[in-house]
Amino acid sequence: MHIVKHLMPAGSIAVLVLAATPAMAATVFVTNNGDDVLDPPAGSFRAAVEAASMDASVTSIRFRGDLGTIELQDTVIYSGPQSLSIDGRGTEVSSIATGNFDLFEANGGADLTFRNLAFSNGGGNGITVEVPGNAEGNLSVSLFDVTVESNSRYGLLIEDQVDDSSASIWLDVLFSRFLGNGLEIGIGDLDGVRVNEGGDGDIVASVHHSEFNGNGADGFELDEDDAGDVTLKALHSSFDENGQNPADTDDGMDIDEDADGSIWVQVAHSTFNGHTDDGIGLDETDDGDIHLSLVQVETSNNGDSGVSADEGGAGDFEIKLVQVSADGNAEEGLNLSEVGDGDFDGSAVGSSFSGNGEVGIAIEQLDDGTGVLRLVNVALDGNPVPYELTGVALTGPGF
């Protein structure tokens, strides 16, 4: 599968010293934590990335053990088109105290893999990937055991809404952490992870055993602005206490699909607690479906809803909840709407929507189509209104 091939263990990659033969894959080693923009020291991270930008045979950068902290003087920029893997061996990439810049930027359309590396305390974004307008096929970004923490703006920004390429964006996040990013005073909408896809292409994301906590705006946002689907699978991860920037109120996870296309989301064994807005927010504004599956998920004590999802054009809405807790939210535990032509089909088993400030479960089906909600062993205690349904029939034991 395309995602998996970029996440092979480091030991499975053939490692070669930088060779003169362009056709042979080569590795450049980082041996010190020095940095100079005008004259990068031999063996420095900047020198290694510049070598990869200038030589298409360089496909791997490896650090010679944990080098401590590299204090960058300016952004390290990778402009090559070839796939590049960077294994930091535990090193932290940071900036000088007065640095107001992104720590790492890639702009050549390359597939990227980061391993065992930290991008912390930068005055801009931690990692920026600018997708060129001529990019095609799939562009992938993979992170394994990566920490992106306390950067003033985005933790990770993948930007394809400037030149609107036709490429799809594939993102893999495994055993990684996006913590406390996006807290720059007076600027909102700075997420832990943000993917902007602007042309004909999809977003395909996979998250495993990772953390997206305490960021300024959304912990994790996928924004598909043209024709294309958004597909996400998230397992054993936390998306907690985001929306911490006073300039914003935001969600644990926010997925927007603004043109023809569908949203497909599967989440299991994960938490979405304590946000200033929704725990999970989905918005499909044109023709397309929403398919949402949550298994053993907690989305409680949020400033708005536990789960909020809107399907606004022609398309169906399917939601399956198993052992979900959406308790103690300021407004609704579950707030769903299907307002265009299409059917709503929902079920909740062994779940709780209790102690919310307004309604336990609120669902609207407002246009042509049918609506049904099946509840089995569901708690709706302590809500001012247990459930509020429009155009949706309620079934299950006791109903």
Image (cartoon, rainbow, N blue to C red):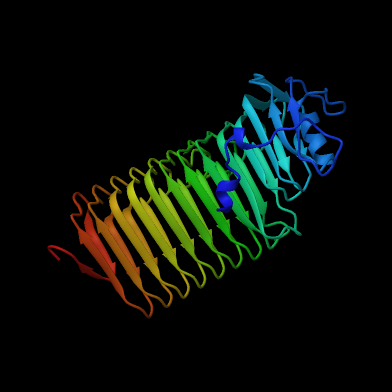
Residue at (57, 42) in percent of width and height: 7
Q: Quadrant of the C terminus?
A: bottom left
Of 120 and 21, nearer the camera is 21
Position of residue 115 measured from the top left corner of the image (x, y, whole percent): 60, 34
Give the tally of numbered discs.
0
Position of residue 363 measured from the top left corner of the image (x, y, whole percent): 32, 65
Position of residue 332 measured from the top left corner of the image (x, y, whole percent): 32, 54
Residue at (44, 73) in percent of width and height: 315
Judged from this view, the residue extending furthest toward the bottom is: 368
Residue 48 appears in the rendering: yes
Side (left or right) of 14 relative to 313:
right
Of 76 and 150, nearer the camera is 76
Residue 187 appears in the rendering: no
Side (left or right) of 65 relative to 278:
right
Of 121 and 108, nearer the camera is 108
Position of residue 183 measured from the top left corner of the image (x, y, whole percent): 57, 36
Side (left or right) of 62 relative to 392:
right
User: Which quadrant of the figure has residue 73?
Assistant: top right
Judged from this view, the residue extending furthest toward the left is: 398
Whether residue 391 is situated above or below residue 5 in the rendered picture: below
Whether residue 241 is situated above or below residue 31 in the rendered picture: below
Side (left or right) of 160 relative to 171:
right
Whether residue 174 is situated above or below residue 340 in the rendered picture: above
Residue at (65, 31) in percent of width and height: 87
Residue at (76, 40) in percent of width and height: 25
